[in-house]
């Protein structure tokens, strides 16, 4: 979230960056929210959401269930399902174009890898 707000990458969030970030965060258009969520999910800032990044985010956002099964296997299955649904160019990672198309086709995928926007209640 910090990286998404810090647009000039100076490791500080200025007042302008804070206000602009909150504006997108709270009242952004679908396009702005897609861009924001993608920036949050792109953990290493390389312009892609990799299989490893998806795994890490899903692992951190899902509750662990007591079971015989290895919980990492279930998360790997979810990553495979997400890639099958969202990776339109079949390169094994999500570009912004892949993510945007998937979210436009199905809005619920906006926060597919964990919550990053506030509930609008």
Image (tube, helix red, strand yellow):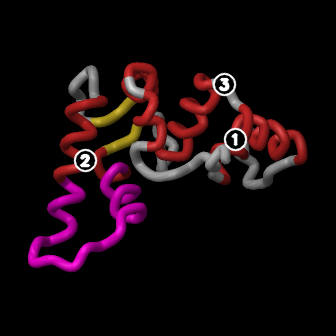
Q: Does the CB distance between marks 2 and 3 fall below 8 Å?
A: no
Magenta span contains residue 71: yes
Residue at coordinates 71% horizontally, 35% vertically from top-left?
A: 24
Residue 50 versus residue 85: which sits nearer the camera?
Answer: 85
How far across and down, in percent of the image, does residue 90 sit? 21, 26
What stretch of residues is rendered in magenta?
54-76
Whole-number angstrom distance, CA of label 3 to CA of label 1: 10 Å
Q: Residue furthest right?
A: 15
Magenta span contains residue 29: no
Q: Is residue 34 left or right of residue 78?
A: right
Picture quadrant of residue 9: top right
Q: Is residue 63 above or below residue 66?
A: above
The residue that disc 1 covers is 25
How far across and down, in percent of the image, does residue 22 sit? 77, 43
Q: Is residue 83 left or right of residue 14?
A: left
- Lower position in the chain sequence, tag 2 or tag 3: 3
Residue at coordinates 75% horizontally, 41% vertically from top-left?
A: 21
Q: Secondary structure at mark 1?
A: helix
Q: Does the CB distance between marks 3 and 1 fall below 8 Å?
A: no
Q: Is residue 49 left or right of residue 3?
A: left
Residue 112 versus residue 5: which sits nearer the camera?
Answer: 112
Check residue 79 in the rendering and tell me which mark sits there, or answer none.
Answer: 2
Q: Secondary structure at mark 3?
A: loop
Assess disc 1: are there few (<14), some (14-19) or many (≥20) residues with their C-alpha within 10 Å of its C-alpha: some
Residue at coordinates 36% horizontally, 63% vertically from top-left?
A: 62
Whole-number angstrom distance, CA of label 2 to CA of label 1: 26 Å
Picture quadrant of residue 91: top left
Foreground tag (2 vs 1): 1
Q: Residue furthest front?
A: 121
Assess disc 2: are there few (<14), some (14-19) or many (≥20) residues with their C-alpha within 10 Å of its C-alpha: many
- Lower position in the chain sequence, tag 2 or tag 1: 1
Check residue 29 in the rendering and tell me which mark sits there, or answer none.
Answer: 3
């Amino acid at each position: 979230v910090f990286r998404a707000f810090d647009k000039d990458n100076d490791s500080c969030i200025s007042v302008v960056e804070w206000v602009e970030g909150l504006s997108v965060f709270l009242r952004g258009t679908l396009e702005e929210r897609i861009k924001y969520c993608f920036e949050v999910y792109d953990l290493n800032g390389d312009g892609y959401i990799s299989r490893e990044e998806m795994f890490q985010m899903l692992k951190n956002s899902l509750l662990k269930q007591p079971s015989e099964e290895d919980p990492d296997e279930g998360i790997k299955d979810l990553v495979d399902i997400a890639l099958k649904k969202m990776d339109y160019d079949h390169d094994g990672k999500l570009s912004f174009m892949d993510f945007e198309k998937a979210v436009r086709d199905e809005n619920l995928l906006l926060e597919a890898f964990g919550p990053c926007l506030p509930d609008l209640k």
